Amino acid sequence: MKKRIAVLASGRGSNFQAVIEAIQDEKIPATCIALITDNPKAYAIERARNAKIPVVIIDYSMFPSRELYECALLSAMQKTEADLFVLAGYMRIIGAAIVRSFPGKMVNIHPALLPSFTGLHAQRQAVQYGVKVSGCTVHFVDESLDSGPIILQHCIAVQEGDDEDSLAERILKHEHECFPEAIKLFCEDRLEIVGRTVRIR
Ligand code: GRF
């Protein structure tokens, strides 16, 4: 049985595109049933339309409070009846009520080796700290920022002269491999969360 996956994205959507292509190439046994975005100008919308994926826009700027926005988002997520929610550059913190509604059913990609450099501008943080290796992390989402059980990580060397942009570009190539691979494992029912650890069967 193919899984139903819904993607949440706020911007460019290159990770979303990598997931679309992995599904089209039958590397991931899933159907992408919706793109949900908080940003009506997100380029991810264009990518969804090209792939004939339904788009749900919940424009954050139209809501008087974060609570009301989150209610609308939760309701849209429930309506999809997705087996998995994929946060592919979704640039808002997911509130606790939403996380609790979909335990073990939400994954995120972060452009650093967690638990280092959580939050925004992870690549900039890595360059400024002077680390010699960085990379990307795919993890389940829990109630804290970038902190859930880790599914996969890819590691790359930070080169002399790297700046935020050059590092981000090299990490992004790995994101586009790592994220579809982790989603494939989920869709094949091969992931088991044991405490903080994700076992891959
Ligand atoms: C990626 O670097 C991802 O790790 C982070 O946000 C960025 C989104 O890029 N969470 P894109 O929209 O997938 O191109």
Image (cartoon, rainbow, N blue to C red):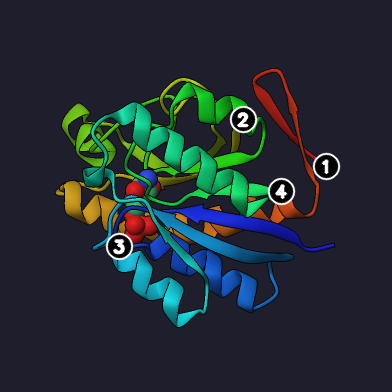
The image position of residue 122, as x and y in percent, is 28, 36
Q: Earlier in the sequence, mark 1 or mark 4?
A: 4
Amino acid at pointer 1: Arg
Mark-to-mark CA distance, 3 and 1: 33 Å
Numbered circle sitting on residue 101: 2
Numbered circle sitting on residue 12: 3
**Callout 3 touching callout 1 (CB < 8 Å):** no
Residue 117 seen anywhere in this rendered image of the structure: no
| Residue under numbered circle 4 | 186
Label 2 packing within 10 angstroms: few (<14), some (14-19), many (20+): few
The yes-or-no answer for disc 3 within 8 Å of ligand 1 is: yes
Q: Name the residue rendered at 52%, 24% in the picture.
A: 97
Q: Earlier in the sequence, mark 4 or mark 3?
A: 3
The image position of residue 35, as x and y in percent, is 48, 60
Q: Nearer the viewer, residue 119 or 177?
A: 119
Q: Nearer the viewer, residue 105 or 64?
A: 64
Quarter of the picture holding the C terminus: top right
**Callout 4 touching callout 2 (CB < 8 Å):** no
Mark-to-mark CA distance, 1 and 4: 10 Å
Label 1 packing within 10 angstroms: few (<14), some (14-19), many (20+): few
- Which of labels 3 and 2 is toward the front? 2
| Residue under numbered circle 1 | 201
Q: Name the residue rendered at 29%, 44% in the picture.
A: 158
Q: Earlier in the sequence, mark 3 or mark 1?
A: 3
Q: How many marks?
A: 4
Amino acid at pointer 2: Ser
Determine whether, in the image, residue 35 is placed left or right of residue 5. Answer: left
Mark-to-mark CA distance, 1 and 2: 25 Å
Q: Earlier in the sequence, mark 4 or mark 2?
A: 2
Amino acid at pointer 4: Phe
